[in-house]
Image (spheres, grey):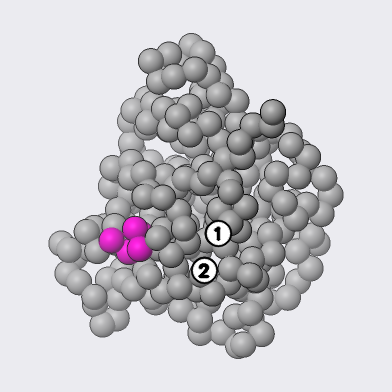
Amino acid sequence: MAAERSILFCFAHPDDESFTVAGTAARYLSEGVRCLLACATRGEAGKMGDPPVCTREELPRVREQELREACRIIGLPEPVLLGYRDRELADAPGDEIRRKLVTLIRQHRPQIVITFDPEGANRHPDHIAISRFTTDAVAAAADPRFYPEAGPPHRVQRLLWTIPVSVWLDLRAGRDPYSCPGVDYVIDIRPWQARKADALRAHRSQHLSIDRFFFHLSPEERERALSIEAFRHGYGTPPPPGATDLFAGL
């Protein structure tokens, strides 16, 4: 019998998931795929909105609430919060965060893990750090020498990366996705674009950047921005050319 399909998303901040995978998660959840989100920080170094929706002291609590609401809208279960500080993720103890992620991988047993590309999409240090930590954990989860108490080893079949902001801007402007370097999978999220938009709007404290990337656009650009999500193949079983399904070829 075929293994139950499962995806684990690993990101750094509340709102990363809505920017990058909200439509993809909604699609696969609708197909019965088990999906889980791990978020490394509560985003306490982020913006507070204009006008502010909270004080700086309140921001971690507010952003956690926004994340939970976005997950509810997308259909994801409660997110796993790893408990690190925003803008300090690169300094997290390597063995500690590896153990947390390996335990999560062995418990959830995903076929696919998705995180930021090695440049962190926009070179944010926390994005780069979660990409590095996730890649390390994917390898360690398959190795029985690491943390035997965390459960039996599990080999992830595909590690996928989100695309850089520069490529995403090209797609938003109408460039053919498969002509862009590093685009290996294009997911049509038009049936779930309203859900993605609502998930983005749930992050009220971060509306300045969200509006700039999604909502303060021409109608044509907004439609394109909310119609596809694209990914780069990191390693594992390679995709067929022009893949439109993350599980193609598995």
Front residue of this view, candidates 51 and 21: 21
Q: Secondary structure at mark 2?
A: helix
Whether residue 249 is visible here, answered yes or no, is yes
Question: Decide: marks 1, 2 in contact (CB < 8 A)?
Answer: yes
Q: Find the magenta span and give its range.
A: 65-69
Magenta span dominant secondary structure: helix
- Which residue is disc 1 drawn over? 26
Whether residue 213 is visible here, answered yes or no, is no
On the image, the x and y values in percent for residue 142 come to 56, 21
Specify the amino acid type for callout 2.
Answer: Lys
Residue at 58 percent across and 49 percent down: it is 32
Front residue of this view, candidates 23 and 61: 23
Q: Which mark is residue 196?
A: 2
Front residue of this view, candidates 152 and 64: 152
**Mark 1 or mark 2: which is in front?**
1
Q: Is residue 81 above or below residue 227?
A: above
Q: Could you give the CA–CA distance between mark 1 and mark 2, rounded to whole angstroms?
A: 8 Å
Question: What number of labels is visible?
Answer: 2
Q: Is residue 10 above or below residue 214?
A: above
Q: Secondary structure at mark 1?
A: helix
